[in-house]
Image (tube, helix red, strand yellow):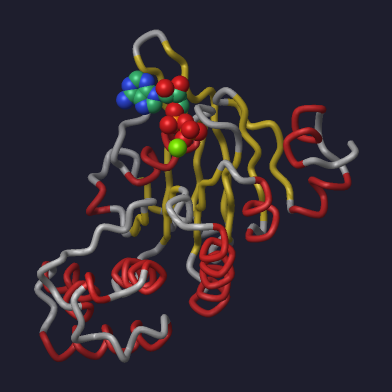
């Protein structure tokens, strides 16, 4: 089992117990969605996974490696947030290759990987442009490209579609799913939108007040919600 293993993770902010005994095993290549109402602890869990926030207790393995005490840069993950900030003074190609350059990878190798990723994301005709000359959807693809070009072990996304209008949201949702099918990288995706969760996930983790309510694939969640909260949240007759 070389995906991600989250073992008894909990998190307190002072007296506030934001995550209570969160345990989840994610298979290599799986697309898991954490979903639940605002404030239930989704972003906190993702930040702990990324190493941006320490857990108060518990253990995290990524690809069989204990990363609990490692810095974000040592965890072999890439994270995409809702505001896809690109470097305005760099071209699309330079934006995608930025992380590789920081790691001292030779220019010829960077150019090759940037071109490959740009092709996958259909921005290969835009490599010389600056971000301000792109549409919202194109900018988003460049931000995704910047994350996947590093070939991370896992991909973490926190509400990546929430700043988009409805039409672009549906389009980008499909694009992220297609990208996942193509590169198959283990993904943990956070959203408060149950439709997004049910359409994108291999498995869905339903959270409420820092507690996992159910972990199941979308069909099972709909057919057999574990409790009334789950039934109400996903809108099944339950
Ligand atoms: P979600 O992403 O599901 O909306 P969060 O993980 O952002 O929820 O927040 C969970 C709870 O933790 C909320 O009650 C929030 O107010 C609280 N919280 C988040 N970050 C901090 C912080 N840095 N300090 C104190 N409380 C926090
Ligand atoms: Mg959040």
Which quarter holds ligand 2? top left
Front-most of residues 64 and 209: 209
Q: Position of residue 46 (x, y in %)?
A: 42, 42
Q: Is residue 231 left or right of residue 155?
A: right
Rendered location of residue 74, percent (x, y) = 24, 53
Coordinates of residue 227 in the picture (x, y in percent): 81, 29
Q: Quadrant of residue 229?
A: top right
Residue 163 % position (x, y): 43, 52
The image quadrant that residue 145 belongs to is: bottom left
Residue at left 37%, top 38%?
48
- The residue drawn where x is 61% and y is 45% is 193
- Answer yes or no: is residue 50 visible: yes
Q: How many marks?
A: 0
The quadrant of the rendering that contains the N terminus is bottom right
The image quadrant where one finds the C terminus is: top right
* Residue 137 occupies quadrant: bottom left
């Amino acid at each position: 089992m070389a995906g991600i293993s989250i073992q008894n993770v909990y998190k307190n902010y002072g007296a506030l117990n934001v995550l209570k005994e969160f345990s989840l095993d994610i298979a290599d290549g799986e697309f898991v969605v954490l979903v639940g109402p605002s404030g239930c602890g989704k972003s906190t869990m993702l930040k702990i996974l990324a190493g941006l926030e320490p857990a108060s207790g518990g253990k995290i393995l990524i690809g069989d490696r204990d990363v609990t005490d490692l810095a974000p840069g040592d965890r072999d993950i890439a994270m995409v947030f809702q505001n896809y900030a690109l470097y305005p003074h760099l071209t699309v190609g330079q934006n995608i290759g930025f992380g590789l350059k920081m790691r001292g990878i030779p220019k010829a190798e960077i150019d090759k990987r940037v071109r490959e990723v740009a092709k996958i994301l259909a921005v290969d005709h835009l490599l010389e442009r600056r971000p301000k000359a792109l549409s919202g959807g194109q900018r988003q693809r460049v931000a995704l490209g910047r994350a996947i070009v590093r070939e991370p072990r896992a991909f973490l996304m926190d509400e990546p579609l929430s700043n988009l209008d409805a039409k672009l949201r549906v389009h980008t949702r499909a694009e992220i799913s297609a990208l996942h099918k193509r590169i198959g990288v283990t993904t943990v995706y956070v959203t408060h939108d149950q439709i997004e969760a049910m359409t994108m996930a291999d498995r869905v983790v339903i959270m409420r007040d820092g507690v996992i309510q159910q972990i199941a694939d979308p069909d099972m969640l709909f057919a057999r919600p574990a409790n009334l909260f789950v039934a109400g949240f996903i809108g099944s007759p339950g």
